[in-house]
Image: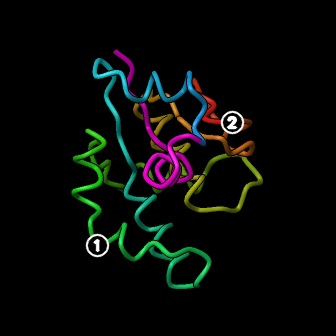
Amino acid sequence: MTAILLDTNAVLHLVASPDRVAPTARELIEDPVNELLVSAASAWEIATKTRLRRLDGSQLLASWADTLEAMTASDLPIDSKDASLAGQLQWEHRDPFDRMIVAQATRRGLTIATSDRAIRAAAMTPVIVTR
């Protein structure tokens, strides 16, 4: 079993256009043996981008719990240890959401599913490339 933390872009693609996720990544993500997790940072990022009108995520946010359940994913809360590590990462990437996902994966030994090059470069745990 692999515990997989889905990056926000992976969540969005799986919900809206699963065909945009690489078939090998989709197989791992859909394998019921693996545990899927979605960070609270992803809900925060989608809400922020929706507020700024860079994304239309209002329906997704309204049905967040149902979406996670349909994906058989668990919600991963953010705690103070996550926040502390995210702020201390020796990484010049300023995106707080990406920093949080890398920190959470690092602390818990999770594999990150993402297409984001910056996350892939900074990850201190295994990565599943989704595109």
- Picture coordinates of residue 124, whole percent (x, y): 61, 30
Q: CA distance from mark 1 to mark 2?
A: 30 Å
The answer to which quarter of the image holds residue 59 is bottom left
> Is 25 in front, or is 86?
25
- Picture coordinates of residue 32, whole percent (x, y): 28, 22
Residue occupying image coordinates x 29% and y 17%? 33
Q: Which dot, 1 or 2, sits closer to the camera?
A: 1
Decide: is 1 above or below 6.
above
- Picture coordinates of residue 64, whole percent (x, y): 29, 62
> Is 112 in front, or is 106?
112
Residue range of the region highlighted in magenta in the rendering: 1-19
Say few, some or many: other residues with alpha carbon within 10 Å of mark 2 (under 14 / 14 to 19 / 20 or more).
Answer: some
Tell me if label 1 and label 2 are in contact, CB under 8 Å.
Answer: no
The residue that mark 1 highlights is 62
Whichever of callouts 1 and 2 sits on the residue coming sooner in the sequence is 1
Residue occupying image coordinates x 53% and y 45%? 10
Residue occupying image coordinates x 44% and y 59%? 41
The residue that mark 2 highlights is 120
Q: Amino acid at mark 1?
A: Ala
> Is 2 in front, or is 91?
2
Residue 115 included in the magenta stretch of the image = no
Q: Amino acid at mark 2?
A: Arg
Residue at the limit of the structure toward the right, as seen here:
92
